[in-house]
Amino acid sequence: MSSVIQVVAVVQGKPGTAEAIERAVSSCVVLSRAEPGCRLYAPHRDVERADRFVFIESWLSREALAEHERTAHFQTMVQELALLLAEPLHVSVLDLLKSD
């Protein structure tokens, strides 16, 4: 398996919180993409459920992801999201399977 990892994170907001969630997320995007270990940081808004957001990310290693989670911009986003969530953040850390 590769050291590069993929992350899929789902943010389910309370009804009516989509704009506030989008603001909290957008403040983190540019800084996250500039991190040396970031290969992809792409938050998406669900077209059928406005208060649901899905992050698709790629990091050079688990260590790079851990470093990201310690940054001030990530911590600020997490704090801003805390009051907006309908359920806990769901994060899946994935290794790409080889297809040889």
Image (spheres, rainbow, N blue to C red):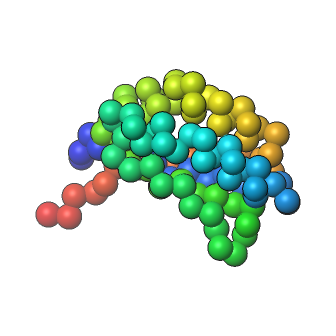
Would you say residue 68 is visible in this rendering? yes
Q: In this view, does 16 lie above or below 23?
A: below
Residue at the spot x=65%, y=73% of the render?
Answer: 47
Residue at the spot x=34%, y=35% of the render?
Answer: 37
Residue 82: x and y in percent read 76, 38
Q: Quadrant of residue 54?
A: bottom right
Residue 10: x and y in percent read 61, 54
Left of 93 or right of it: where is 64? left
Residue 94: x and y in percent read 41, 49
Residue at the spot x=57%, y=31% of the render?
Answer: 73
The extreme bottom residue here reads 48
Left of 46 or right of it: where is 12? right
Would you say residue 90 is visible in this rendering? no
The extreme right residue here reads 15
Residue 9: x and y in percent read 56, 50
Residue at the spot x=65%, y=30% of the render?
Answer: 76
> Is the C terminus in the top left, top right, bottom left or bottom right quadrant?
bottom left
Q: How many labels does the image show?
A: 0
The extreme left residue here reads 100
